[in-house]
Image: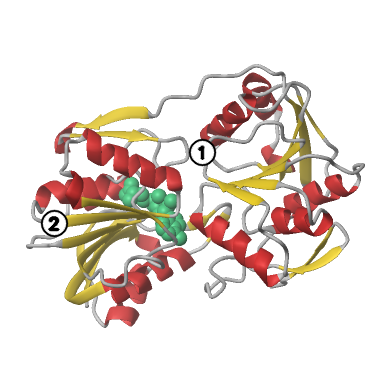
């Protein structure tokens, strides 16, 4: 795997976050290079530049290297991206004191000279981001969107026209294109979170636009809900909580427990908090953390149950390194005798990992596709 990245005339060293992950994936892709190539071909830019959905800092570091004094702002929903960008700036001795960091719920700055954006995988989230931009980008200002050529089609361009303004795609370069979109100056209304019921558990849920499982129960989550462990638990972690459905159910099953909701997506943590409140649970029992796995959780927290429906991709990349990191972090945070209770696709072979880590792994339930596994510390 290469870490040497050259763009906008600078040689940079870029790593994914966390750097120690068991993966040979690179920290940037050809769409990053294409956006920076486009930028290099422009006359000098005056005024703040916005950067949206930068995975690990290729865009931010590339732009900062070219424009050391420029005011920048970056929007990301992923904690791993924010930490990755900040680590890569520091690794390359690039200034970060005039960069504003925003989540996908913060108010965006107005009057940006230019915004560069990577196309996210989730098109509902993309539409939401365009709507947010439509409210702040002056008529005639430019948004450049980098994406794999195969992700760009007429319906994607129509989506941009609907939510932001006229859009045209460049010629392909390294199997990517850059879409130039011009703000039409019309502000669109932000979508309301979708609200839906899980009647069998008496829950009402809502999801912000970048939260896993949109408006239905994930099939892995469903089998998990049908097979929660018996016991008297006091401290529970819902690791990779999404909208919080597992932790919300745990709060009813174990009425003495505090529940900690953790997710890499800031919108997921916000949805879990909103769902905790709207389901009438006691405020003092719910705790909400925007984090990469359990990296920054209070050192004193020792859990007796960790519930986890792990992801098997990071952005576009299929990978099990996050699941592995979640299992490792869970083991560190469990008290002796504490339980890690997970669901996974049968073919992913999580039992091998758990057995290696905990020395034990029990199959609690299974169907054709999923298994529920449990390991005790
Ligand atoms: C398969 S979904 C499960 C969501 C929910 N628990 C459920 O069962 O419906 C996996 C979740 O893990 C989160 N995730 C991905 N990488 C993470 C990381 N490094 N740290 C914490 N959460 C992460 C994703 O944002 C997503 O919400």
In which quadrant will I find the N terminus? bottom right
Q: Residue at x 10, y 54 (%)?
A: 254
Q: Secondary structure at mark 2?
A: loop
Residue 257 badge:
2
In the figure, is residue 120 to the left or right of 45? left
In the figure, is residue 228 to the left or right of 46? left
Q: Quadrant of residue 117 in the image?
A: top right
Res. 96 in view: yes
Labels 2 and 1 touching (C-beta < 8 A)? no
**Image depth: mark 2 or mark 1 in front:** 1
Q: Residue at x 77, y 46 (%)?
A: 176
Of mark 2 and mark 1, the one earlier in the sequence is: 1
Q: Nearer the viewer, residue 372 or 232?
A: 232
Find residue 348 and report its horizontal and vertical position in percent.
40, 64
Give the Cα separation between the discs numbered 2 and 1. Answer: 32 Å
Find residue 17 and report its horizontal and vertical position in percent.
56, 66
Q: Is residue 192 above or below residue 114?
A: above
| Residue tagged 1 | 106
Q: Is residue 129 above or below residue 78?
A: above
Q: Nearer the viewer, residue 61 or 377?
A: 61
Q: Quadrant of residue 51 in the image?
A: top right
In which quadrant will I find the C terminus? bottom left
């Amino acid at each position: 795997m290469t870490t040497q990245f050259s763009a906008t005339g600078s040689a940079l060293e870029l790593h994914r976050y966390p750097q120690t992950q068991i993966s040979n994936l690179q920290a940037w892709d050809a769409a990053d290079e294409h956006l920076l190539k486009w930028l290099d071909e422009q006359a000098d830019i005056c005024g703040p530049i916005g950067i949206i959905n930068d995975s690990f800092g290729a865009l931010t570091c590339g732009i900062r290297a070219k424009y050391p004094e420029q005011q920048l702002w970056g929007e990301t929903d992923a904690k791993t991206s924010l930490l990755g960008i900040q680590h890569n700036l520091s690794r390359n001795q690039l200034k970060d004191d005039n960069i504003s960091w925003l989540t996908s719920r913060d108010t965006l700055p107005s009057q940006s000279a230019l915004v560069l954006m990577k196309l996210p995988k989730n098109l509902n989230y993309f539409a939401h981001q365009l709507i947010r931009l439509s409210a702040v980008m002056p008529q005639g200002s430019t948004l450049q969107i980098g994406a794999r050529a195969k992700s760009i089609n007429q319906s994607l361009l129509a989506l941009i026209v609907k939510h932001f303004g006229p859009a045209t795609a460049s010629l392909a370069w390294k199997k990517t294109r850059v879409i130039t979109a011009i703000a039409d100056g019309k502000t669109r209304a932000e979508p309301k979170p979708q609200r839906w019921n899980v009647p069998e558990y008496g829950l009402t849920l809502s999801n912000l636009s970048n939260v896993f499982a949109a408006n239905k129960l994930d099939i892995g989550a469903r089998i998990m809900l049908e097979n929660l462990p018996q016991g008297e638990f006091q401290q529970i972690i819902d690791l990779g909580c999404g909208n919080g459905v597992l932790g919300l159910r745990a709060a009813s099953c174990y009425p003495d427990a505090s529940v900690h909701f953790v997710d890499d997506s800031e919108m997921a943590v916000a949805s879990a908090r909103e769902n905790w409140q709207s389901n009438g649970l006691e405020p003092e029992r719910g705790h909400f953390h925007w984090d990469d796995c359990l990296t920054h959780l209070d050192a004193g927290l020792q859990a007796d149950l960790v519930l986890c429906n792990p992801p098997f991709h990071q952005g576009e990349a299929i990978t099990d390194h996050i699941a592995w990191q979640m299992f490792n972090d869970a083991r560190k945070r469990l008290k002796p005798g504490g339980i890690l209770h997970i669901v996974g696709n049968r073919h992913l072979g999580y039992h091998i990992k758990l057995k290696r880590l905990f020395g034990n792994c029990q199959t609690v339930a299974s169907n054709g596709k999923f298994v529920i596994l449990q390991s005790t510390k």
